Image: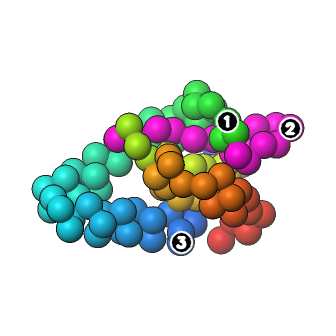
């Protein structure tokens, strides 16, 4: 674990979780709760070993800054690994158009 990295969450990260949860709750409130509750252990694994997951192919960089972790078989947790920062960008459905993923590219770390 690299304890020197600051952990940041983009506003879109929390918004995407809420939007997905609201969508799921329309058909299954229990699954929506599970979606939200089960994400914390996955985020902890990412924080402990951020480079263990593959680069996001729709956000290519020479240094593979953008990475993804599959969550609940259908969703991607997209994040950016820098030397001193780990930035969680969004959670998106894996069937989303690549242009939607490409929009997550950022240099704004607030």
Q: Which residue is mark 2?
A: 62
Residue bearing the label numbered 1: 55
Label 3 element class: helix
Q: Residue at x 35, y 41 (%)?
A: 72
* Percent of width and height locating residue 101: 64, 55
What residue is at 50 percent from the left and 63 percent from the top? 13
* SS for callout 2: loop
Classify the position of the N terminus by image quarter. top right
What secondary structure do most residues of the magenta stretch adopt?
loop
Circle number at residue 11: 3
Magenta segment: 58-72
Of 46 and 75, the residue lying toward us: 75
First of labels 3, 1 by sequence position: 3
Q: Residue furthest top?
A: 52
- C-alpha span from label 2 to label 3: 26 Å
State the CA–CA distance, disc 2 to disc 1: 10 Å
Whichever of callouts 2 and 1 sits on the residue coming sooner in the sequence is 1
């Amino acid at each position: 674990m690299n304890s020197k990295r600051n952990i940041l969450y983009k506003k879109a990260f929390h918004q995407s979780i809420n939007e997905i949860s609201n969508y799921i709750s329309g058909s299954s409130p229990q699954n929506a709760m599970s979606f939200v509750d089960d994400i914390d252990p996955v985020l902890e694994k990412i924080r402990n070993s951020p480079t263990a997951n593959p680069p996001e192919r729709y956000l290519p960089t020479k240094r593979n800054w953008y990475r993804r972790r599959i969550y609940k078989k259908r969703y991607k947790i997209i994040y950016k690994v820098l030397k001193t920062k780990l930035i969680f960008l969004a959670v998106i459905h894996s069937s989303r158009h690549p242009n939607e993923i490409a929009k997550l590219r950022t240099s704004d770390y607030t």
